[in-house]
């Protein structure tokens, strides 16, 4: 089953309005808060999520942002959205990192970057399967699908995390087989799948789902090792979604100034005997490759999450400085307690982002597919830092904001003749900042850090892309402890013979600190950011003039 036809020319990038209109061509079965959604494009409770996705389309058409937000895939004649690009250099990874940060400065969470992460992982595992079999079928099948996705500029929901049932049991041991999505039938035309996928970001307002396994499978779990593409409105799919952001809410302190405009929905997606034709099946039953797909996706995704939360950190830094000014401290740097809190907030944000930059710089080409993979150690350290420091970021934002967030009067008091004048007088601090402007930035800060939505984003930051325990496991598994052991043994002149079976010397990574910085001659570098984003991020990257025509490709 192919996606419903769209009223837009293939091969052209969509605008945000085009994306909104394209959703009308799909008829997914969606429930939000117990109610059936007849039209996703019209549903008020999903508009903040749709708005966030629309930004990824509009930025790609903005002449100032297009060099960053688009890329040229090798052998393609037109630009593709950066969120759908297969990385061909470390420069591509740097550009993706900056693109996601720029998007999330605007939206809080742009969501569409998950498609990039999944497409790159499937690209790698398709090549891996063909290499093991001495064939080219899987690569060709994925390449055809990638061309369709890029040409139609689709948004893809990543259906990876299974419901999982009893966590102590493997997929084939579950009392309810649908706790993990699995193949229930194979025939000459394709496969039939059933099961549940949880935490599918933006499910209701995507065009298609990329179904992927969430763990390493064993031979008994072969039916659960399936990777395929399915339109969101395929027969047998039910999407049980939460609202995106806080649309229409009127809480104590007024309508949310940010999350009523931008938000993120997640959903449980139920698959009940959903048919998938073979041309959309990237693998089924290849259990021995499920771990590679999961690992590759997690590494790409944690790299992207770094940039997403850096964009959110930029919002907190800007709002914190505005709160200081509104409270009477025009220059927070002159007040030691404010300066220290602001610098700590900046340090946290830029520390995990720097890990993302390092993961890009030290990226390596995949041995089989040739596409570039972020360094797993730096990617996981950056994700671990943001996951555990998100709560400190909120605390620091509260420190510099003062107690006004707690004392905010309800918005109706602004129009109460008995109280409005008095409140405007006593709650004004800096004479250069009107009362209503001080209250506005306080409500904005509350929305970002002290609301239901803020708490939910904290949980997503902690567990999205895997738990901290999973990241620690990957850091230890990939970190070259053996190099450090060899260093100390050389200094101690112990003269021990290298033993590959010795656990503490197993991991080695020679050449990381080479003179050339592990960059190949002529490798692409970061394109210039638009002026506003460059100032916000505090960086001024340079353009590699040799790649202005086709960024991110070898010369």
Image: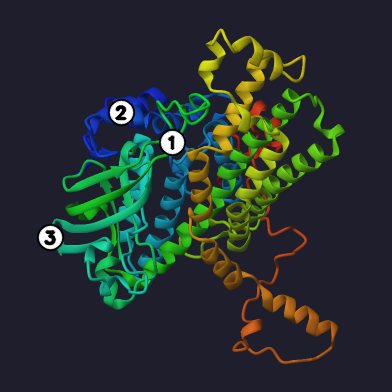
Tell me where residue 228 appears, x and y as whole percent: 29, 55
The quarter of the rendered structure image containing the N terminus is top left
The quarter of the displayed image where residue 181 is located? bottom left
Q: Residues within 10 Å of mark 3 (few under 14, many from 20)?
A: few
Q: Which mark is residue 188?
A: 3
- Distance CA(mark 3)–CA(mark 1): 35 Å
User: Is residue 344 in sight in this rendering?
Assistant: yes
Q: Is 501 located above or below residue 153 in the figure? A: below
The quarter of the displayed image where residue 111 is located? top left
Q: Residues within 10 Å of mark 1 (few under 14, many from 20)?
A: few
Q: Is 280 located above or below residue 335 in the figure? A: below
The local secondary structure at tag 3 comes to: loop
Q: Nearer the viewer, residue 141 or 450?
A: 450
Which mark is first along the chain, 1 or 2? Answer: 2
Q: Residue at x 52, y 37 (%)?
A: 451
> Which residue has dot 2 on it?
43
Nearest to the eye among marks 3 and 2: give it. 2
> Which residue has dot 1 on it?
77
Which mark is first along the chain, 2 or 3? Answer: 2
3 and 1 marks in contact (CB < 8 Å): no
């Amino acid at each position: 089953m192919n996606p419903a036809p769209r009223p837009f020319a293939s091969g052209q990038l969509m605008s945000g309005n085009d994306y909104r209109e394209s959703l009308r061509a799909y008829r997914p079965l969606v429930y939000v808060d117990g109610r059936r959604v007849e039209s996703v494009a019209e549903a008020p409770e999903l508009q903040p999520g749709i708005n966030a996705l629309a930004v990824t389309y509009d930025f790609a058409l903005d002449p100032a942002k297009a060099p960053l937000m688009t890329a040229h895939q090798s052998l393609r004649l037109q630009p593709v959205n950066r969120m759908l690009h297969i990385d061909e250099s470390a420069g591509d990874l740097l550009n993706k990192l900056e693109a996601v940060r720029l998007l999330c400065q605007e939206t809080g969470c742009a969501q569409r970057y998950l498609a990039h992460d999944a497409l790159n992982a499937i690209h790698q595992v398709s090549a891996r399967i063909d290499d093991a079999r001495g064939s080219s079928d899987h690569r060709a099948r994925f390449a055809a699908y990638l061309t369709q996705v890029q040409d139609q500029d689709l948004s893809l929901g990543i259906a990876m995390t299974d419901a999982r049932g009893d966590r102590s049991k493997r997929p084939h041991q579950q009392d309810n087989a649908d706790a993990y999505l699995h193949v229930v039938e194979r025939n000459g035309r394709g496969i039939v799948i059933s099961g549940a996928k949880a935490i599918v970001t933006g499910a209701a307002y995507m065009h298609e789902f990329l179904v992927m396994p969430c763990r390493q499978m064993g031979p008994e779990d072969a039916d659960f090792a399936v990777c395929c593409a399915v339109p969101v409105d395929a027969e047998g799919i039910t999407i049980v979604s939460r609202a995106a952001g806080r649309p229409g809410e009127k809480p104590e302190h007024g309508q949310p100034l940010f999350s009523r405009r931008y938000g993120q929905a997640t959903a449980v997606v139920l698959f009940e005997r959903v048919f998938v034709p073979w041309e959309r099946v990237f693998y089924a039953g290849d259990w021995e490759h499920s771990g590679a797909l999961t690992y590759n996706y997690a590494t790409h995704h944690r790299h992207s999450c770094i940039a997403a939360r850096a964009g959110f950190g930029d919002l907190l830094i800007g709002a914190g400085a505005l709160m200081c000014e509104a409270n009477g401290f025009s220059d927070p740097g002159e007040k030691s307690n404010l300066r220290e809190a602001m610098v700590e907030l900046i340090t946290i944000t830029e520390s995990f982002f720097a890990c993302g930059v390092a993961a890009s710089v030290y990226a390596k080409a995949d041995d089989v597919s040739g596409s570039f993979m972020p360094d797993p150690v730096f990617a996981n350290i950056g994700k671990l830092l943001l996951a555990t420091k998100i709560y400190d970021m909120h605390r620091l934002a509260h420190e510099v904001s003062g107690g006004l967030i707690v004392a905010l009067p309800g918005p109706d008091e602004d129009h109460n003749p008995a109280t409005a004048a008095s409140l405007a007088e006593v709650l004004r601090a800096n004479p250069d900042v009107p009362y209503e402007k001080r209250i506005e930035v306080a409500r904005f800060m509350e929305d970002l850090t002290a609301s239901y939505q803020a708490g939910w984003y904290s949980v997503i930051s902690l567990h999205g892309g895997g738990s901290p325990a999973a990241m620690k496991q990957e850091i230890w598994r990939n970190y070259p402890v053996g190099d450090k052991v060899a260093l100390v043994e050389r200094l101690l002149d112990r003269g021990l013979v290298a033993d590959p079976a010795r656990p503490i010397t197993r991991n080695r990574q020679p050449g990381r600190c080479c003179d050339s910085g592990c960059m190949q001659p002529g490798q692409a570098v970061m394109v210039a950011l638009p002026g506003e984003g460059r100032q916000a991020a505090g960086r001024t990257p340079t353009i590699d003039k040799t790649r202005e025509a086709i960024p991110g490709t070898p010369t």
